[in-house]
Amino acid sequence: MNFTFERLHRFSRNIFLTIGCSETDAEIAATTLLSADLRGVDSHGVARLSGYIRLWEAGRINAKPDIKVTYETPSTAVVDGDGGLGLVVAPYAMQVAISKAQIAGTGWVSVKNSNHYGIAGVHAMEALEHDMIGISMTNASPLVSPTFSSERLLGTNPIAVAIPAKEQPPFVADLATTTAANGKLEILLRKNEQAPLGWIQDKDGFPTTSPNGVKDGGALLPLGGDREHGSHKGYALGAIVDIFSAVLSGANYGPWVPPFVAFLQPDPNPVGEGLGHFFGAMRVDAFRPADEFKENMDIWIKRFRTSKTTADHDKVLIPGDPERELEQERRATGIPLLKPVEEDLRHLGEKFNVKF
């Protein structure tokens, strides 16, 4: 069944208000959350609303955080999220990066003491309207084994980069540093489907197609799947995100990252504060005139769009195309929800006396 963006946004906002968020924070959290559903990243949208509430009930999310900059230079800052919703902390930190870039040309912000921040791409895209390049990263639940390891030491640790163009839509790359995000496993479980080979290894380090493989003690695999297909590169990218997001800010890193998933508990001996993010904003005119750059981005995009295709495809996509097309479609026809997600939201509404 399809639901309008407005209906799901109103419901999510009211749930966030019920747990004590301010009007402003509830609005920001709902908008950030629903951006995932609009862009087709269903694993990170309203399907995770009950997960945020579960963390709040466990005392792991502060509904009324005092988010603030704790250290800064003209072009850098550390933001303390005070245990708040990452859906609110991240937009605050990205605006700090943009403000720094407006003055210094570039702005770089590392965040500690936060929580899951939704999809990485929506935060990077905040820079576009300022003729800036946006960068967004976050560490995440330790569900990923480094190459040659059977231990879970990293998260899916996504990277997003948004680059403005002139007449063409912006270039927006938003990717996990694993072969697949954990949310894709959650969707497979709801659909009762198997995972492709190369996504997961079991607790002994052998390939498995069970969507329960991670819950059963196994791990997600870095981008590439195995060493022969380049998993060492995915491992390195995930490690970079972890270091920029957490070692740099003072958040928890590696296996100490507080998990979002229900089947793991936080480490009783943390090495930092909460979960970490990293944001960058780069003013295009700090490098060359913005119009000149964007005209050249148009040329770049058009050339790639018109490249010769393989026999089984009719066009070449630019990063961000599928999500942009889905957003247009879903704003018009509604957001489809799997039956288990719909039922989960109804139960959540009943629990908090919020009409779904």
Image (cartoon, grey):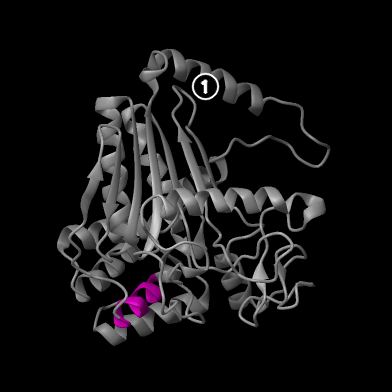
Q: In the rendered view of the protein, which quadrant contains the C terminus?
A: bottom left
Range drawn in magenta: 49-58
The location of residue 115, given as percent across then percent down, is: 36, 64
Decide whether residue 356 is among the magenta residues: no
Q: Residue tagged by mark 1? A: 297
In what element is the residue under mark 1? Answer: helix
In the rendered view, tell whether residue 147 sits above or below residue 79.
below
Relative to residue 270, is residue 217 drawn left or right? Answer: right
Q: Residue at x 36, y 18 (%)?
A: 285
Relative to residue 194, is residue 167 drawn left or right? Answer: left
Please, what is the dominant secondary structure of the magenta stretch? helix
Viewer-side residue, 82 vs 40? 82
Kind of residue at badge 1? Met
Relative to residue 188, is residue 196 drawn left or right? Answer: right
The location of residue 93, given as percent across then percent down, is: 29, 47
Q: Which residue is drawn at 29% across and 79% down?
A: 59
In the rendered view, tell whether residue 161 sits above or below residue 87.
above
In the rendered view, tell whether residue 94 sits above or below residue 148.
above
Q: Residue at x 46, y 72 (%)?
A: 259
**Can the viewer see residue 190 in this picture?**
yes
Q: In which quarter of the image is residue 88?
A: bottom left
The location of residue 131, given as percent across then percent down, is: 36, 26
Viewer-side residue, 302 vs 58? 58
Q: Residue at x 63, y 57 (%)?
A: 178
The location of residue 158, given as percent across then percent down, is: 52, 52
